[in-house]
Amino acid sequence: MKITVKSSKAVKPANGPAAAPDVVPLSVFDKVNFDTYVSVIYVFRPPTPPNAALEAGLARALAEYPEWAGRLGVDGRGNRAILLNGEGARLVEATADVALDAVLPLSPAPEVRSLHPSEDGAEEVMLVQLTRFACGGLAVGFTAHHLVSDGRATSNFFVAWSQATRGVPVDPVPVHDRASFFKPRDPPRVEFDHRGVEFKKPEPAAPPLHAEAGNNVDDEVLVHKAHFSREFIARLKSQASPPGGRPCSTLRCVVAHLWRCITAARGLDAAGAATTSVCIAVDGRARMIQPVPDGYTGNVVLWARPTAAARDLVARPLRHAVELINRELARVDGSYFGSFVDFAASGAVEAEGLVPAADAAEMVLSPNIEVDSWLRIPFYDLDFGGGRPCFFMPSYLPVEGLLILLPSCYGDGSVDAYVPLFSRHMDAFKSCCYSIDLH
């Protein structure tokens, strides 16, 4: 597949630049998140609207979401902020020399990076690439900065672009207020420990090699897409759910299964007193005491971190792993989110020189894993007028142990899991990930 870039331009909001650009300080949830770009790829079969119609729709969507036409900078106090200067998003137009059927389904390999703009040297917080295939199919690749919004809010913008292209009202209506939802309580109540959880001391300038990497710093990380059918997930749920109790959710049973499989594939269960944790992103919109509306345009995510002895995790049943996950997810409730806001606003972060624990530079997570669940994000609602996407995927992201879960393109309740592991562990993972019993 050869990709040829035909043009690259700035697309500015349809309502023109603001007379006096606003400066929107990042919220406490924005600042604690990953300071990096995230790239995803949608694929549509023909017919699709012409690029000019998509460009016009993008300009109208940017008028509704001025954050994505702005730039990251600082406010008058030196705090990181979004500058609503209307400079625009980057739009790249490209062609592919093959038909879609020659490359679908796309594999999680370095080549897919050619279907979305590179973040290297980017000033924009949103970059989009339209790649036309020989058959008339279209790939829409996004590269968006995570400090501006979380996955749910970014997806809302994508859907708004498709709605604007079709000429229908934007829904949900974007809510831009990044201040009033996250005010500290009076008096503040820091009820949980946030040091070493959302915040940490800065790493040394030259951190030692991760213990798992050892002398294998050149060991290749492979990304495997594991497909779990609806029938397999039903079997997981039957193993994970308590007798006569509430059925286990798809997310929790799949995460528990993958956590156990990866721990076994890494051989950690034979490593004496090794411990392992799974970091799970938790959306706070419905959990906060003051609920945050669905149309909110920023980040509202914290993390649960269930931890277990590796040997115990693998030896005990799937239900045990689910119970660990349930307990930690329940702990990250409205009180926890409120405690985080109070701690972040207390001055302790600045006084102690703490930095976000979410570190985009960390490339090896073993003995732990991290899970980003996109199961509830409506990727397949994106419709520019020619129908919904036939395929969706995250870009190639070889961060060992960083898993992404998303609904499969079949729309039948099955799940795809993108699993990056060292090549030396991948065969063992593949041999157990489709089995209910690890023993």
Image (cartoon, helix red, strand yellow):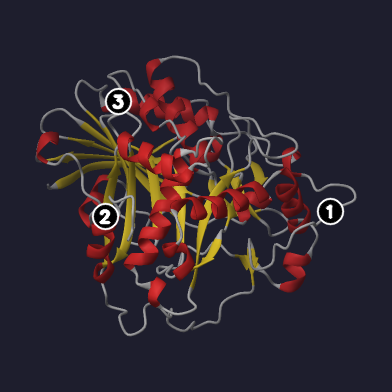
Q: Residue furthest top?
A: 168
The image quadrant where one finds the C terminus is: bottom left
Viewed as shown, does residue 351 lie left or right of 406?
Answer: right
Earlier in the chain: of badge 1 and badge 2, it is: 1
The disc at residue 248 is: none
Could you tell me if the residues under marks 1 and 3 are in contact, i.e. CB atoms within 8 Å? Answer: no
Q: Nearer the viewer, residue 23 or 32?
A: 32
Whether residue 6 is visible, yes or no, is: yes
Q: Identify the residue at image location x=58%, y=36%.
A: 297
Q: Position of residue 339 (x, y in %)?
A: 76, 53
Residue designated by label 2: 224
Amino acid under disc 2: His
Pinpoint residue 428: horizontal percent, then vertical percent.
26, 64
Tell me which numbered mark, 2 or 3, is placed earlier along the sequence: 3
Give the residue pinned by disc 1.
Answer: 189
Q: Amino acid at mark 3?
A: Ala
| Residue 272 quadrant | bottom left
Residue hosting label 3 = 52
Judge by depth and name the residue closer to the eye, 55 or 433.
433
